[in-house]
């Protein structure tokens, strides 16, 4: 069992930056992939970025070059550094975890989910 608590959302202007955090507790000994997902009103949840314990990572095309996913294993914390934010990045952001090392942005592959943290980008 893994528990995830996301934080760091807020309101910023277009072009600004935010860093999301996700604290992991519970089974921190097994190998997991961690991901960030987002869901805007009226839209389906989409994968933003994911990273696995073997270092593999993947990004959605819409955020490549602007977002960076990282993890601090000593602190059991996952991060998403978001830069050059756009109004279309506005959404509820969720962190998630899945066992194994097969990196993916498929939401249905993830077993554990944190509560969302809202990101709002104004133009």
Image (tube, rainbow, N blue to C red):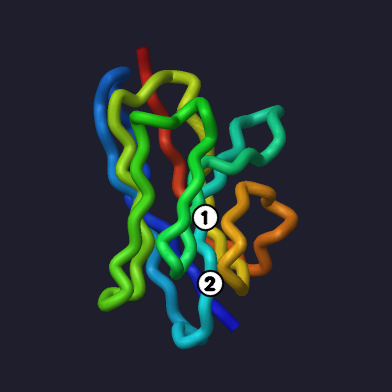
* 65 relative to 71, above or below: above
Q: Is residue 120 left or right of residue 50?
A: left
Q: Position of residue 33 (x, y in %)?
A: 53, 65
Q: Which residue is mark 1?
A: 35
Query: Which one is in front in this view, the residue at disc 2 or the one at disc 1?
Result: 2
Quadrant showing the C terminus:
top left
Q: Nearer the viewer, residue 19 or 68?
A: 68
**Secondary structure state at the residue bearing disc 1:** strand
Q: How many marks?
A: 2
Q: CA distance from mark 2 to mark 1?
A: 10 Å
Q: Are marks 2 and 1 in contact (CB under 8 Å)?
A: no
According to the picture, the residue beneath numbered tag 2 turns out to be 32
Image: 112 above or below 105: below
> Mark 2 falls on what kind of element?
strand
Residue 88 in the figure: left or right of residue 121: right
* Label ID, residue 43: none
Task: Residue at 57%, 57% (x, y): give it.
Answer: 103
In which quadrant is the N terminus drawn?
A: bottom right
At 26% from the left edge and 33% from the top edge, which residue is drawn? 17
* Position of 60 relative to 28 (above/below): above
**Callout 2 environment at 10 Å: few (<14), some (14 to 19), or many (20+)?**
many
Image quadrant assignment for residue 73: bottom left
Comparing 23 with 56, the one in front is 56
Please identify the residue farthest to the top as the structure is shown.
123
Residue 112 position in % (x across, y down): 62, 68
Q: Residues within 10 Å of mark 1 (few under 14, many from 20)?
A: many
Percent across and percent down for residue 58 are: 50, 45
**Can you give x and y, in whole percent of width and height, for residue 61 in the image?**
52, 28
The residue depicted at 45 percent of the width and 42 percent of the height is 118
Residue at image location 30% in from the left, 24% down from the top: 84
In the rendered image, the vertical position of residue 34 relative to residue 14, given as above or below: below
């Amino acid at each position: 069992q893994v528990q995830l608590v996301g934080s760091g959302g807020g309101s910023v202007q277009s072009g600004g930056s935010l860093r999301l955090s996700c604290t992991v507790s519970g089974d921190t000994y097994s190998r997991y992939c961690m991901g960030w997902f987002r869901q805007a009103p009226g839209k389906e949840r989409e994968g933003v970025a994911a990273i696995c314990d073997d270092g593999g990572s993947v990004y959605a095309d819409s955020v490549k070059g602007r977002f960076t996913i990282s993890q601090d294993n000593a602190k059991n914390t996952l991060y998403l550094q978001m830069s050059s934010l756009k109004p279309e990045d506005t959404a509820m952001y969720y962190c998630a975890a899945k066992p194994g090392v097969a990196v993916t942005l498929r939401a249905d592959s993830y077993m554990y989910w944190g509560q969302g943290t809202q990101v709002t980008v104004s133009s």
